[in-house]
Amino acid sequence: MSMKTKAILLGTVALMSVLTSEEASAQIGTPYIHDPSTIMECEGKYYTFGTGGGGLISEDGWEWHGGGVRPGGGAAPDAIKIGDRYLIAYSSTGGGLGGGHAGKVLTMWNKTLDPNSPDFAYTEPIEVAHSLDDEDCDAIDAGLLLDPTDGRLWCSYGTYFGFIRLVELDPKTGKRVEGNEAIDIAIDCEATTLAYRDGWYYLLGTHGTCCDGPNSTYNIVVGRSRKVTGPYIDNVGRDMLEGGGKMVIAASDRKTGPGHFGRFIVEDGVEKMSYHYEADFDQGGRSVLAIRPLVWKNGWPVAGEAFKEGTYEIESERRGYALELAVDFVRMQGSMHRFWEKDDKPLVPLKSQTLDDVIGTWPQGDINVRIGDYMFRPHQKWTITAVSNAGGYLGGHYYKIVIEGTNRALAATTDAEVVTVPAFTGAPEQLWRIDQLTDGTYRIMPKEVPGTDKELVLVSTGDSTPSLGKFDMNSDNSKWNFRDH
Amino acid sequence: MYNSQKHIMTMNIIHRKTGLAMCLAALLALPAFAQNPPAGDFPPPRQAYKIQTPTYLADYFTEATPGVVSPDENGFIRRWLLLEPIDKPNRSNTVFTDSYLRQTFDTLYFKNQFSILPKDGDKVKVGKQKLAWHALDSKLYNVKLYRLAAGLKKQVYGVLFWAVTVIDCPEDMENVRFSAGSNSASMWWLNGEEVLLLSGDRRMVVDDGLSRRLTLKKGRNILRGAIINGPGMSDFCVRFMDENGMPVTNITISYQ
């Protein structure tokens, strides 16, 4: 169901609201938006535009506020950077499910997205596609793809009313390629966009009920094709022209109605997906911007995990060993049984080793870290907690990582190694960025490494030795898992 | 000369499960551990069963030449001065905590232990033991200490080995890491500075533990290691890795 007009109203109300719960939020600040365009980075800031005009700006990718300027109103824009310019596509709506369907897709350029820049000026909008009032298409909800294999520019558009269509645009002008005929590529979608990866073209669209707040069933689905023109087939072989689509993300964590997918590639192996939730229950049920890791599983995009605070084993992907304090291993007392002898004594559960059992054996000052066999012992359990007012990054908080039950914190050192300090102070070398990677493992990265501007991540230099090093998606040394057990 | 030293040791082959049961039974017979038991609380080492499988030193080592050699193509350092095993009774390798190892490796067993660069055949006195240094090239990427001891008809369990080698660098090499795997625990020093401790009941794994970034200085660098083992196999493998994680091969190794 398409009810963009309602969405515009929701968005306006949302902009007047305030943050209620930082940890539970998709993003912090005033991230109220519907149909966020693919996030663009421009001169060190992040931008996204939404239905009804305007948009959000963020300094760090975590805290978002209004201030983006996108004229033309209408519905569900998208953005793409081509060369040194930004191309914005948006649409004037035909009026939703019960209204007319005479939509128009328009494009316009800007050299910058910073409204305070002297270079900030949109070009005159150009119509690149339209739909007549009662044909099997509603020409709104544009999505853009610059094909990395040949540099051709494509635009998908449409809603539940009829077909999703694909047209080709000129990447130099943003105009429709002369003589290009629209191709039907899907039905039952809204807010589509395209992506390319490893020889596959992906068509991502939103299914379900739009604009119904906490009751909205909006969800994002995907099909894929070897050609940009389709057919886009889902995981069970259904064509998206037959309504097919594999789920990318649905409601979860007190947030309903994910919709309007956008892909942001941070670097090789680190990707994010932007979208909105129709209703974030912890932000008054408002429609909010959300950013999650984008994971690729067996050639399909799936929403990664929004990292949850908790106590974890930090497991190296290299060997499967656990990050731990370099302290004496304290053996459990007794409880050895002759397993080859029959024993009819009642079973008595063993007590787990506790922090009190061992902390007296630990040094008071800095303690090195190493990687070892996971034995669910106190020196291997890390409590990871978001740190307020420490800024963030695209889609996440900074976290402190301490030994459970203590304030002993993991920290980067001036010689680009890692250590634990007796007490967390909030220093930037004790703040950690956590990104789920495209293969589902995680990257753990200090906010700062003292004495260098280099961006380094937690690595396994050996099976048993952690350090800091350059991130390499092709090496398991750069990857970690968080195990809750 | 080692080709002629084909010592035969014997070992009774017993059923694996029975052996395991015997080991556990023996362990259970010990008094309950109070935290981590000091090694001194253990009875003398249980020597290996009479070994039937012959160990020929020549299968594992060749006599080192006086000159220099390069690391192998994967950077492993194969030329070492190895001291015959010091008697260090430990019934189990689980006692090898950091604290135990630091205390053990800080103990002086022989004169100039932390600075000596012995000659092939030199002898040191450790308690009642008179032990010789052997300049050897390992035929393998790793150095099989168990086979060294067995080949020399020395004890193979409850042992502490010392190893020394000299690394020559054509120029200062910064941001390299020392890499080691050992069975069981070990500690390593480069030019007198501790660079790595591998603790616990540990099997030898290539690139198990790496030092922090360090500099191999131009000219001679003395690398020294101590490897401790209770029962079971004992060996080590050592190399240096450059800042890109690749083995360092443009160095030479000697024992003089």
Image: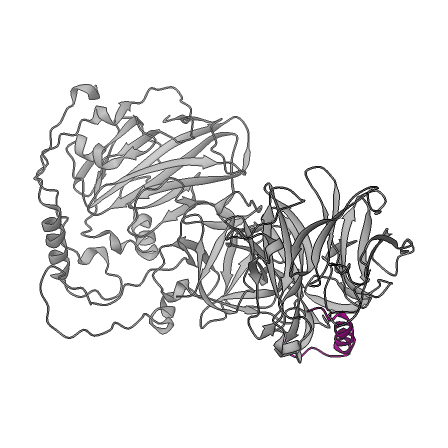
The stretch drawn in magenta includes residue A2: yes
| Front residue (pair A42, B182) | A42
Does any portion of residue A362 appear in the rendered image? Answer: yes
Does any portion of residue A393 appear in the rendered image? Answer: no
Residue found 77% across the figure and 78% down from its top: A13
Number of marks present in the image shown: 0
Q: How is the image coloured?
A: one colour
Going by the image, does B182 lie left or right of A483?
A: left
Going by the image, does B132 lie left or right of A440?
A: left
- Name the image quarter holding residue A72: bottom right
Going by the image, does B241 lie left or right of B55?
A: right
The stretch drawn in magenta includes residue A322: no
| Front residue (pair A268, B149) | A268
- Percent of width and height locating residue B205: 35, 42
Image quadrant in which the N terminus of chain A is located? bottom right
- Percent of width and height locating residue A429: 60, 59
Image quadrant in which the C terminus of chain A is located? bottom left
Tell me: residue A471, above or below residue A78. Answer: above
Going by the image, does B82 lie left or right of A409?
A: left
Residue found 60% across the figure and 70% down from its top: A387
Task: Point out the stretch of residues depicted in magenta.
Answer: A1-21
- Percent of width and height locating residue A424: 55, 68
| Front residue (pair B55, B13) | B13
| Front residue (pair A74, B30) | A74
Residue found 35% across the figure and 29% down from its top: B78
- Percent of width and height locating residue B230: 21, 47
Tell me: residue B141, above or below residue A276. Answer: above
